[in-house]
Image (cartoon, helix red, strand yellow):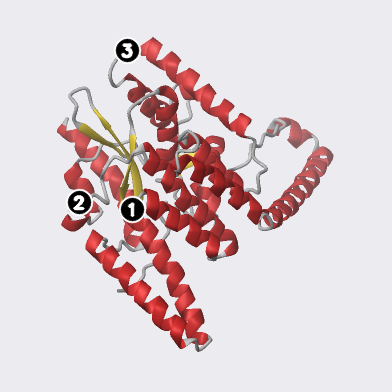
Amino acid sequence: MKRPTLRIFESGTFASHTCQAQSKLAKEPQRRTKLSYMKRTIAILAILFTLTLTDSFSQNKPAYESAFNEIQKMLKDESQLDFKRAVFLTENAFYSNILDYNAFCRQIDDIENRLNQFMVDRGVLNHVMGKQFAIFNYMIEPSKYNDNIRMNYDFEDLMGNKDYSKMFVTKLLSTKKGNCHSLPYLFKILSEETGAQAFLALGPNHLYIKHKDDKGQWVNVELSNGSFPRDGWVISSLSITTEAIKNEIYMEPLSLKESVALTMIDLALGYQFQFGHDDFTVKCIDTVIKYFPKCVNSYMIKSEILGERLTAMKQANKAKEVTQIEKELKGLYDKIDAMGYKDMPKEQYEQWVKNVEAEKEKTKNLE
């Protein structure tokens, strides 16, 4: 079985600037020259600052250990399960603990206040789906509640292959651009904060939201473009196998503990992006397998790690280790196949993201 490259699942920085009116600049060529020089200088300083931060990010492995320990305590029931906190910990580790959790919470609290005002204004405060409706509206529909700026899908490096921070909720909050990782994560965080019943659900290389409607029927919420795709379309478009559905590895609402365990994958992938695979990533993935045994992505990542070790052992001519790893890999591949996994190439997934818009329009026409 060939191991495909895995990248399942975006903190930006806040920036502000002021500009002079074009008419004034036209009348002041010398000042314009000075401004151009200043802009170039600022741009150079920004690049140097970014390079400095990038270098500092790569020097702090203890930040990952700290995040791991805190999330593990949640999974072991030694502390309260907190999805918002777990998400922050994984992103903060990537940035070597320079993020401010209180500031992050204030951003979420501000959104929650806006959601409450929305529900009051729309008269849905006590409706069974009022909170889910408010969250969806805040994220998808431009209005006074989100300062007329909806959250859009970021098609640039949508899998975070070049910049793993593309996957982060902190990046989504600062830029209003996210992907199929950060968008459902934010929806889940807001659901937990408001007490709404909404759940993460997995698809091949994908993550979305499920919640029940006022009739108790499950609704799929696709935040990449704000649609509600049918189960049949999700299955066919993502090429989900019958075995995967039977084994409940896709399309199932995740429990809070499973959702928190999922952040361990983010921690492992962020670490891998900066340092490569080692015992830390194995520790993260083994933890996911323990607390979320139906997470096929964890087995995929572990097979990738073992594949790298196998190559190294072969190059070192260590026959005993090669035999041992090959045996373990075969067991993993058999497990993955039995779970019903089917590879979806990156190009196919990118096309799928674009096709979601067509499905949304089709659904509108049927209404």
Q: Tell which of 231 and 82 is nearer to you.
A: 82
Dot 3 or dot 2: first in sequence order is 3
Identify which residue, 32 or 165, lies in the foreground.
165
Q: Earlier in the sequence, mark 1 or mark 2?
A: 2
Direction from residue 23 to residue 115 in the image, left or right: left
Numbered badge on residue 293: 1
Q: Residue at coordinates 48% horizontally, 62% vertically from top-left? A: 282
Circles 3 and 2: CB distance less than 8 Å?
A: no
Task: Using the image, determine if residue 217 lies above or below residue 273.
Answer: above
Inspect the image, locate mark 3, and give the three-letter code of the amino acid beneath it: Asn
- Judge left or right: residue 84 versus residue 228: right
Which of disc 3 and disc 1 is earlier in sequence?
3
> Of the residues tagged 1 and 2, which is closer to the observer?
1
Q: Position of residue 239 (x, y in %)?
A: 22, 57
Q: Amino acid at mark 1?
A: Pro
Residue 364 x %, y %: 22, 33
* 296 relative to 152, above or below: below
Between the residue at mark 3 and the residue at mark 2, the CA separation in whole angstroms equals: 34 Å
Is residue 18 visible from the viewing direction of this image?
yes
| Amino acid of disc 2 | Ile
Q: Which residue is mark 3?
A: 126
* Marks 1, 3: nearer the viewer: 1
Which secondary structure, mark 3? loop
Secondary structure of the residue carrying tag 2 is helix
Q: CA distance from mark 1 to mark 3?
A: 37 Å
Q: Is residue 5 visible?
A: no
Q: Position of residue 323 (x, y in %)?
A: 40, 82
Tell me the quarter of the image containing the N terminus: bottom left
Q: Position of residue 58 (x, y in %)?
A: 66, 58
| Residue under the image location 58 percent in, 32 percent down | 104
Q: Which residue is mark 2?
A: 245
What crowding class fits label 1: few (fewer than 14 Cα within 10 Å), some (14-19), or many (20 or more)? some
